[in-house]
Image (cartoon, rainbow, N blue to C red):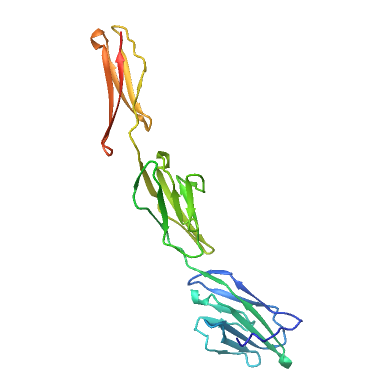
Amino acid sequence: SLLTYWTSPTTAQVTVEAVPPHVAEGKNILLLLRNRPETYQILTWFKENLNGQDIVIARFMKSSGTNETGPAYSGRETLYPNGSLFIQNVTQEDARAFTILVTGENSYFSTAKVRFQVHPLLTNPKNTSKSFYTWEGSPVALMCEPKTQNTTHLWRRNGQSLSEEDRLKLSEGNRVLILLSVVRTDTGPYECARRNPVSASPSDPFTLNITYGQDVPITSPSNIHFHSRTNLSLSCQILTHLHSILELFIPNINTNNRGSCTCLVYNLSLASVRTQSRTLQS
């Protein structure tokens, strides 16, 4: 490029700071010139093109106090008399090298170069999976969509952060959450949050449901010996539904009630039946 062979003097070196160094698409940025020599005559800004060449954006002439625009000027740039360059409505195409040339008396010159990062404003991601239901013991993958460059991801279940462990793996920069062998306690809402240097956005909860085999019901009391003319209360429940209890109450029990009582649990989705029996003895 034109500036490749220029060398800077050993005295006051100009520098440029991007404010902010990370900017969202559509926002504004200031390329702030520092250590500008008082004896400058011309300030010229260049923008690197796709071929690595430095193309003139604009220059400011101190003697006349006027600006001239160049081929790289897009109408979004403002060159201030102090040498700083203001850029409005930045795009990904602006994430290139910008160079300022400070020309002074007796052919004195100094240069400085700066780059900044342009990031998209993140929208709310969406959690996706092949199915809302999965069998206990099988793997399942949750994906945070869409895929976005230079973005970090954080997963939560029931509001708690998730990290890699024996049954849980993260891939594609934590964008994909894999449960290698789900258990029924993995049921619940999963959320994915995305973040880049300029924005952050959480997903809506995705509820994962685990389908599992029917538990054997539990009956109590386990050993049933009764006395005639007393009341007897029997209960039946399963471990996964401890709040659902079936009760059988037999008032004023007698020898005619002797025999077997069976608790039957039927799972409609699995079309399975589990039973547990207890024998009443006097």
Q: In the displayed image of the protein, which residue is found farthest to the left?
A: 256
- The residue lying at 50 percent from left, 81 percent from top is 76
- Left or right: residue 90 versus residue 38 is left
- The residue lying at 40 percent from left, 44 percent from top is 188
- Left or right: residue 230 versus residue 6 is left
Residue 270 in percent (x, y) is at 28, 38
Q: Is residue 34 above or below residue 42?
A: above
Residue 40 in percent (x, y) is at 69, 87
Residue 142 in percent (x, y) is at 41, 52
The quarter of the picture where the N terminus appears is bottom right
Q: In the displayed image of the protein, which residue is found farthest to the right?
A: 11
Residue 200 seen from this side: yes
Residue 91 seen from this side: no
- The residue lying at 41 percent from left, 51 percent from top is 141
Residue 128 in percent (x, y) is at 38, 55
Question: In this view of the protein, which residue sits in the foreground, 61 or 127?
Answer: 127
Q: Is residue 115 above or below residue 44?
A: above
Q: Is residue 149 above or below residue 192?
A: below
Question: In this view of the protein, which residue sits in the foreground, 18 or 55?
Answer: 55
**Quadrant of residue 277 within the rendered picture:** top left
